[in-house]
Image (tube, rainbow, N blue to C red):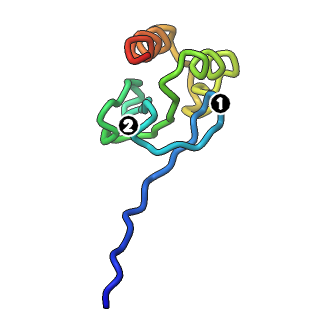
Amino acid sequence: MQQQKTKKIPMRTCIGCGTEKPKKELVRVVRDPEGNLSVDLTGKKNGRGAYICHSTECLKKARKGRRLEKSFSMQIPDEVYDELMRGIAADE
């Protein structure tokens, strides 16, 4: 008798609140090899990624603690935070 394998769910940690959640429940911010930042809704873009909950509170904590800057080792323009805030606010 063969046992069915259970599919492993990829887990990621929110940079705002620090809780671990399934990858699909989080928003991915990605820095591509050229150094450009963007919001990756598909989760498949090339580059270094950081994850954040669909919560304005988590985004505020991440911004206050400069956690995106630490994740990507670079300055984050206000436009990126504004784009994230619009995307998250639309989901709530």
Amino acid type, residue under disc 2 in the picture: Pro
Q: Where is residue 73 shown, x and y percent of the image?
A: 59, 31
Q: Where is residue 46 shown, x and y percent of the image?
A: 33, 41
Residue drawn where x is 53% and y is 21% of the image: 55
Amino acid type, residue under disc 1 in the picture: Cys
Residue drawn where x is 50% and y is 13% of the image: 81
Is residue 43 rendered to the left or right of residue 28? left
Q: Earlier in the sequence, mark 2 or mark 1?
A: 1
Secondary structure, mark 1, is loop
Give the position of the C terminus as an image quadrant.
Answer: top left
Give the position of the N terminus as an image quadrant.
Answer: bottom left
Q: Quadrant of residue 42?
A: top left
Whether the residues at callouts 2 and 1 have beta carbons within 8 Å, the answer is no
Residues 2 and 16: in front is: 2
Q: Where is residue 54 shown, x and y percent of the image?
A: 48, 24
Residue drawn where x is 45% and y is 40% of the image: 48
How many numbered marks appear? 2
- Residue bearing mark 2: 33
Residues 52 and 44: in front is: 52
Q: Circle 1: is it few (<14), some (14-19), or many (20+) Cα within 10 Å?
A: some
Q: Where is residue 59 shown, x and y percent of the image?
A: 57, 19
Is residue 33 rendered to the left or right of residue 19? left
Q: Residue furthest front?
A: 1
Secondary structure, mark 2, is loop
Q: Circle 2: is it few (<14), some (14-19), or many (20+) Cα within 10 Å?
A: few
In the displayed structure, 85 sits above or below 65; it is above
- Residue bearing mark 1: 17
Residue drawn where x is 35% and y is 30% of the image: 40
In the displayed structure, 33 sits above or below 16; it is below
Q: CA distance from mark 2 to mark 1?
A: 27 Å
Residues 75 and 29: in front is: 29
